[in-house]
Amino acid sequence: MDSRLAADLTGLPDLLTAARDYAATVLDGLPDRPVAVPAPEVAPAPLPVTGAGASGALVEFQDRWAPGFSGSAGPRYLGFVTGGATPAALIGDWLTGTFDQNAVTRQDSSAVDLERETVAWLRELFGLSDAHTGTFVTGATMSNTVGLAIGREWLGEQRGVSVSRQGVGALGDIAVLSGAPHSSIYKALAMLGVGRDQLRTVRLLADREAVDVAALEEELRKGPAIVVANAGTVNTVDFDDLRAIAALKSKYAFWLHVDAAFGAFAALSPEHAELLAGLDLADSICVDLHKWLNVPYDAAVQFTRRRDLQVSVFQNTAAYLTLPSGDPDLFHLTPENSRRLRALAAWFSLAAYGAEGHREIVIRNIAAARRLGDRLAEIPGARLLSPVRLNVVCFGVDRDVPALLAAVASSGEAFLTPTVYQGVPALRAAFSNWRTQESDADRVITVLRDLLT
């Protein structure tokens, strides 16, 4: 054994203590750490020949790389839709690396059963019935991809072909319909061989990002299709009328996929749960967990009512693998054959804080978003472009948006991301971190006022 490796094995308890102490220092400093930092120039280092051991590597990381890392796990990182990691989730993530389970089969571990339990807890959290089965994947993009792959197989079933065996060319023309699809939907269609251009956007309701159900029905009259509905759009957290869309299934044949990447967490707010009415009627659902569940990257879950079609798409056959029958092992259900036990961090956070603890996070984040939206009126030239429906504030300013965003980031106080809403350059502030308080919204208002007045 290499001498440095042998020394690290002997000194592992002390090394873990050193890493723990350093991690604790980083986490304790998150509230005051610059939320975003210009990436410093770090000269590439050559591949080490002998190496410095784990202790030396930790020192080098602290000196060379850590100063350029953002405070994205902190309370005022409001770009994209970014959560953090609750204390319990962080413990679960560390233990995921410790046990290093390849969570795909019951042949050698109970890891798969832990994932099944976690999925069942999540199903209950979001108000879904036992008709939905679920599996962990890397993020919303992969969750959407899996759901659309199952929908593609369903289209083949309607036309008497097997896409998984014959290829997407056997389907002929494919109709994918959506009102305001997330960019990951286009990416998924490209990866699945369906093609970005096959997505037909359907008319929206006036001044909304919600689809006009009457216009959707007109499109459905043309034949079987995949419908991508939104439970929380990325710009304004608008929700399609899922119940009305699902009701169209009594007249038309279509696969209903719901992108609920972070909107699914509206189920935890009594004031907003009605927005998800009809979610359980979907054929497949995407939920991203490293957003509002506040577990470390990467973690998401996909749900479907048609596990049989899911197995048709993703099954893996080899002499050393279990058969895809009954309750299939997980390598039969997603693109990965090898996968880390992503479910453990989610299991820890749900076991530690339960539905009530996560409900408190959601309600507190919504309150912070509302506070920011309300206080924008105090800033000349700033204006809401859409009502604050949940946890995202979409607003415009009478200034150059990229320059303002750069100035906000340079202040170290906050990080926001740009968008374009109804043709207007805009800013987004997305509240989904478990540490965030209404006082953090006030700090964002202060930096915006300083920069805009």
Image: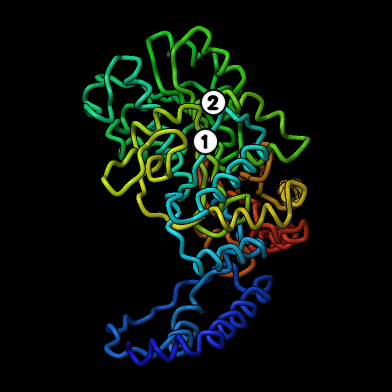
Q: Amino acid at mark 1?
A: Phe
Res. 70 image quadrant = bottom right
Q: Is residue 452 left or right of residue 319?
A: right
**Relative horizontal placement of residue 210, taking residue 339 as reference (left or right):** right
Residue where numbered disc 1 is placed:
303
**Quadrant of residue 93 within the rendered picture:** bottom right
Residue 183: percent from left, percent from top: 43, 40
- State yes or no: discs 1 and 2 in contact (Cβ < 8 Å): yes
Residue at image position (55%, 81%) is 16
Separation of residues labelled 1 and 2 (CA atoms): 9 Å
Image position, residue 130 (x, y; %): 60, 30
Identify residue for label 2. Answer: 282
Q: As shown in the figure, which amino acid type bears the numbered disc 2? A: Ala
Q: Residue at x 60, y 38 (%)?
A: 236
> Is residue 446 left or right of 246 when viewed as pictured?
right
Question: Between residues 232 and 235, which one lies in front from this camera angle?
Answer: 232
Say which quadrant the N terminus sits in: bottom left
Question: Considering the image in quadrants, where does the C terminus appear?
Answer: bottom right
What residue is at 43 percent from the left and 49 percent from the top?
105
Residue 193, above or below 63: above
